[in-house]
Amino acid sequence: MNIDFINIGPIQKANINLSKKLTIFCGENNTGKTYINYSIYSLLKTAFNLVPDFMASHVDEIKEQGIYQIDMRHFFDQRFESLIKKIEKNYLDMLPFTFATNQDFFKDSQIQLHFNKELLSEYSYKKEYNDSLVVGKNKKVLEIEKQTDSPIVMVTLLEKGVPDRLLAEKLSETILKIIFGDVFGKTFLLPAERTGINLFFKELNVNRNVFIDNLNKLEKKRSRQIDLFEFMDDIISRYPLPISDFIYFLNDLEYLKRQKSEYKSLATELQRKIVKGSYRIEDKDVYFQPYRSGKKKLNLHIASSTAKTFFSLVFYLEHMAEKGDYLIIDEPELNLHPDNQRNIARIIARLINKDIRVIISTHSDYILRELNNLILLNEKFKGRSKLMKKYKYSEEELMSTDSIAPYLFGDHAVHPMEMSREEGIIAKTFDSVINSMNESADDIYYKKREHVDNA
């Protein structure tokens, strides 16, 4: 999938290719990286939340016939382009909510989605799909089945009286997942504000409960009907969508911790190599237990800045991560020593090699240089094995330039960064700053040395 973003914040135009395993955004401050990160998050998260009118015409026939067939070949021939337009419109309608601002701010914004229609058609033909619609106490009212190597989706209505909108929504979701299931994966975003949010989310909950108690008393006195939880959710929703979603994620830890992910080993590695400790969730509190501290545990708010920053990533890998996910990390280098910036680069490489699609925005020259090491080591050459052993690289960390899409932000535009198998990612944005700094340091050193020598 290629996306053209037009007039999004400071960005006049950006073409982003999301078909790569690793997408990298670099550039100076205030050049629009967060705007594009949030825009991608919103698109991936809400693509399946279309108004169901594009499938509404099938509902009457399903209710009349009971068993109904949808031919995906007909859909691709006659309705694919209109579906893309609806996804684009849905994204634009969501922009004010995504950024928690007024609609006029995005009045000139546009988005254009570009897909390989033939490839998607082939994918949907081969895909096997089974689903159902359940209402009430586990009452199944609709079954949906598509066999592999078939264009036909079989829809069976099991009960009468199912609301038209519910049927249309389920059909819309089905068609979208059959066509785009591997394109619009589950998305998890770690905002740059994660360290602070990890600290205040509990206080937000406490204040929320106190506020609700007080409003309850007020409601009883005045006999007013107030949906208190909806009222507080409205307050949280005044943050940009990725921030409010991150707060909801933290509020849901007790439930989410019951799940187990196949990426737990990477969470363990991250704790061992970077945060030097483990996390525990007890009675809605998050604790950090440093290694070599015996059984002593710390409330997260008094743990190190690194422990605070990486809690959410560790939790995601341990309990939530699934193959095909999009993981968006704003500044993965946050609060990290340069050596650990290299370590997080290696963990990102292991993630993409285990089918997690990663998008990062970074100011770290260390991360890019370490990724370049992994690119260069991906090809066989004399002495490679000795180097890998010496610097403790593993085959699971290596990657090719074909799996990476790096972009440079600046001057209201976004440009692909150069890459080669011989050098990896050519990061001129960092090189120019480093060269300038070295030049000024040399000038200062030698001028002072000259003064001392002449004294």
Image (cartoon, rainbow, N blue to C red):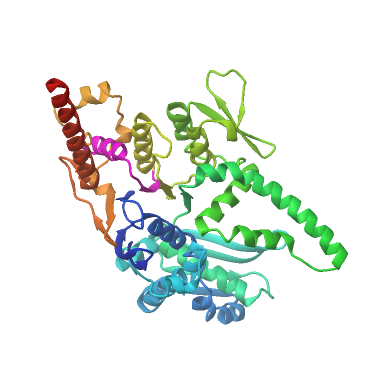
Residue placed most toward the observer, 422 or 25: 25
| Residue at screen point 17% across, 22% down | 452
- x, y percentage for residue 286? 61, 36
Q: Residue lying at the far front in this picture: please name it.
A: 455
> Depth check: 388 or 55 in front?
388
Q: Judge left or right: residue 373 versus residue 454.
A: right
For the C terminus, the image quarter is top left
- Is residue 213 magenta-colored? no
Residue at screen point 39% across, 39% down: 333
Residue in front for this viewpoint, 399 or 212:
212
Q: Residue drawn 57% across and 77% down? A: 62
Q: Quadrant of residue 1?
A: bottom left
Residue 450 in the figure: left or right of residue 155: left
Residue 360 located within the stretch drawn in magenta: yes
Residue 121 location, x and y as percent? 35, 66
Q: Is residue 239 above or below residue 85?
A: above
Residue 224 in the image, given as x and y percentages of width and height: 82, 69
Identify the residue shown where x is 46% and y is 32%: 265
Region rendered in magenta: 355-376
Quarter occupied by residue 127 = bottom left
Is residue 123 among the parts visible in the rendering?
yes
Q: Position of residue 447 (x, y in %)?
A: 15, 30
Please give left or right for residue 344 compared with residue 116 in the image.
right
Above or below residue 376? Residue 272 is above
Q: How many marks?
A: 0
Residue 255 visible to an observer of this rendering = no
